[in-house]
Each structure stands twice: as structure tokens, then as C-alpha cells.
Image (cartoon, coloured by chain):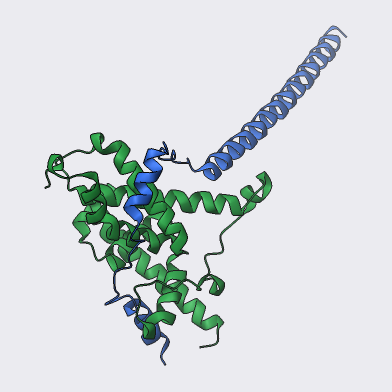
Chain colours: A blue, B green
Amino acid sequence: MDINNQINEIFESTKGMHKAEPSPFLFDQVINKINRGVKPASYSYNGNQFLRWTLAFSISFIVSINIIAVVSVNYKKVSVAKAEVTVKNDLYNAITYNY
Amino acid sequence: MENLNNISFEEIVKQNQNLVYNTVISFLQNNEDAEDVTQEVFIEVYHSIDSFRKQANISTWIYRIAVNRALDFLRKKNAKKRQGIFSTFFYKKTGEINVDSAHFNHPGIILEKKESANVLFAAIDCLNEKQKTAFILFHIEELPQKEIALIMDISPKAVESLILRAKANLRDKLKNFYKNRGI
């Protein structure tokens, strides 16, 4: 059978289905639970999503802090080195001019 | 519109138990779980009947509770399957139809169509929550898109788009499923 026909047959498989029936004692069971003080359970938040986002945020925060730290240390080193070179050049020039 | 003052809780249960059970069973694909969740739905109905806005249809409101309870049950069940912080973080659903999960026998399906319906339910199980809800309510519960929009609290256009995407996804998954089986 052609695959598309097979898929169409799958889609049609629920056409004309009968309604399923719950237990005939459903109402009694519900009332029994209510009388026993059973309260509706609270809905769970999507814990996985929360955990994933928290972890992703923490990792990106730590990485950003490290990048900033490395960049600022390098910048300081470069500016100190530049300053040293400038001072040296100035001294050299000064000596040259004096000479 | 129904006048709730004249309807007892027993009548609410009797009038809506089939719609709740059938909706929930399509999501959970397990008879015992569906019974438990159906009971939970009516316990919630009992405790929050005062918050029900009487302008809306009571069945729409009950459908909404049933869908939310069924999805919540599935979330909890899936979370239990993946225990441990690292397996939770790195777990990824393959999205492929699991033949093993096609063991569910919907009690309303006629015998000749059982095999096809099992594959359909296994494929539905691979859809995301929104597409799954829209597809089940439209294709299996045969609700109009307007009512689905009220139940899902989205626009009818969004419902239409969800149904189209769900059908396209199901087609792709079923094609892959049959290709992998060499058909």
C-alpha cells in the first residue's frame, strides 16, 4: 500500500469511534475522596524548563564575568606597557636632546 | 449557558464524566491513569465551582480543567522517568514514534481499526503540548475550533495554525516510522 494512503488510513482510524465510559462508580469515588478531605493537587510548574534556564543563566553569567576579568587585566597590562614605553621614549628623547 | 444554581454536583458529574474521561484518556493513553485524573478533575470542579464565570459554558470550563490536569499528569510522569539533575538537563526527546508505546487500546475504537489507531496515538504522544491539545480536541473530540480557542485561551486563528502544524508533524513522523520499518 502507498505510504500516503497508509497515513490517511491512520488519520481516519478514530473516525466513528465510540465514546469510552468511565467507571459507573465515578461519582461515588469522587464524593468519597471529597468527604475524606482530598483537595485538588496543586499544578506543578515546568521544573525542567526552570532548571535548564537557571543553569544556562548561571553558566553564561560566570563566563561573562571571566571574559570581563581577562579583558580588563589584559587592558591594564597593555596600558601599563604602553605607559612604560612612552616614559622610556620620553627619557630617551630627553637624553638625546640634551646630548 | 446553564444555570448552575439548579444543577447539583451529581448532575454536573453525570453530564460531563464522559467528555472528561474521553479527553483525558486520549492524553494519557492509559485507562487506570485516566480514571484517577477524571476523579481529580471533578474534585477540582467541586472546590472551584465558585470561581467559575457563569458567562462561559460549564463544559468548556470543565474541558479546560481536564486538559490542564492531563498535561500536568504527563509532566509529572515524564519528570519521574528522568531522575537526576544531569539526566534532566541533557535529556532530549527523540521525537520518533515509539512502537513499544503503541500498546494502548482505546476502548472506543472498533477492532478493525485498532492497529492504525494505536500508531496514531503513539504519534500523537510525540507532539508538543499545544499541538497535542489542539489535535486531540479537534480530531478526536471533534470540537469546533471556536470552543478549542476558548479552552486553550488562544485565538481561533492560533488554533487553526496549531492543528495544521500538528497534522504536518504527524505526517512527517508517520512517514519516518514507515520508512524505518521498510514500508
Marks counted in the figure total: 0
Q: Position of residue A84 (x, y in %)?
A: 80, 17
Image spot of residue B1 (x, y percent): 11, 47
B174 sits left or right of A90 in the view = left
Q: Quadrant of residue A89?
A: top right
Q: Does the image show residue A4?
A: no
Q: Residue at x 68, y 47 (%)?
A: B86
Q: Within the image, what quadrant is residue B162 found in? A: bottom left
Asked whether residue B7 appears in the rendered view, the answer is yes
**Position of B82 relative to B101 (above/below):** above
Between B36 and B22, the one lying in front of the other is B36
As rendered, which of A88 and B159 lies closer to the eye? B159
**Is B73 in front, or is A27?**
A27
Q: Quadrant of the C terminus of chain A?
A: top right
The reply, left or right, for residue B2 in relation to residue B71 is left
Is the residue B70 above or below the residue A37 in the image? below
- Residue A20, position in %: x, y? 33, 68
Q: Residue A84 versus residue B97: which sits nearer the camera? A: B97
When the figure is inspected, residue A67 is found, relative to residue B20, above or below; the finding is above
Find residue A9 and report its horizontal and vertical position in percent: 35, 83
Instruction: Please give the name of the residue rendered at 24% of the width and 55% of the height, measured from the top-left corner.
Output: B14
Q: Quadrant of the N terminus of chain A?
A: bottom left
Residue at 41% x, 60% y is: B27
- Horizontal side of A90 relative to B97 (left or right) equals right
Specify whether B107 is left or right of B158. right
Q: Residue furthest top?
A: A98
Question: Looking at this rendering, what residue extends furthest in the right direction?
Answer: A99
